[in-house]
Amino acid sequence: MHDLTPDDIERLPRHVAIIMDGNGRWAQSRGKPRLFGHRNGVENVRSIVNTAFKIGVPYLTLYAFSTENQNRPGEEKSGLMRLLEEFLKCELETLMGDSIRLRAIGDLGGLPGFARKAVEETIEKTRENNNWNLTLALNYGSRQEILRAIQAYASEDRPPDTELDWPEFSGYLETRDLPDPDLIIRTSGEFRLSNFLLLQAAYAEIFVSPLHWPEFGKEAFVEALKDYTRRERRFGKTSAQLNSSPEPAFPSST
């Protein structure tokens, strides 16, 4: 299935987050409507989720719909939400059979009622699953998430001289049950984060693929993982320090 070595497997990222970009451009380059690209993108989600699950990456987060995507044409947004509903209903049996827990980050209140219902029902049905973790970022924007976290923190009573540190503040983020991403993959050759996990990505490695999302298949995903295993994550230290110390360079976020 893959050519990862035992050493590669040992160095795999714990959490991979993917900015799935290029569905529309992929479709238009073939003379097809944008929704054709989105439907093929959903099929690729199935493939990449299955690959990550089998390889043993414990956490996968997919940037499925951003707050900025609300500016897309109504027909495209409606089609995306129907694809989301269809995906969740079709994949529920697999999620339950493989004990995969679904989470969602973002403002679900901004989704159409039928899509929000499908997401919330799937989250509830998979809540006790504990074998693997899939998170969908839906109507998500990192700046908005940060503002909501600040508002939640500020609304609580505490002594005025209380000092705030990252472990405490991260508990107010929507990703509080997840480790920070080790690897962020972006498809379609774009070199930006697009308001995705801005704080959580502080120490993430970034891999940009020129492939549009529908064509970013298993082989491309494995190549991104192999690239990650060859990187030296220093977290502010020097290579000499890392090589001389058996301790991890940076503590796990959770």
Image (tube, rainbow, N blue to C red):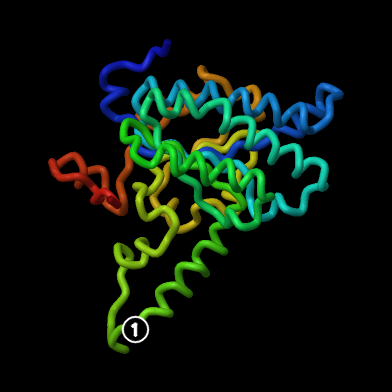
The amino acid type of the residue labelled 1 equals Asp
**Residue drawn where x is 73% and y is 28% of the image:** 37
Front-most of 105 and 96? 96
Front-most of 183 and 76? 76
**Residue drawn where x is 41% and y is 13% of the image:** 2
Front-most of 87 and 159? 87
Asked if residue 222 shows in the view, the reply is no
For residue 33, side relative to residue 66 (left or right): right
Measuring from the top left, give residue 1's x and y in whole percent. Answer: 42, 10
The relative height of residue 44 versus residue 112 in the rendered view (above or below) is: above
Q: Secondary structure at mark 1?
A: loop
User: What residue would you read off at disc 1?
Assistant: 157
Q: Residues within 10 Å of mark 1 (few under 14, many from 20)?
A: few
Asked if residue 52 shows in the view, the reply is yes
> Quadrant location of residue 173?
bottom left
Measuring from the top left, give residue 239's x and y in whole percent. Answer: 26, 43
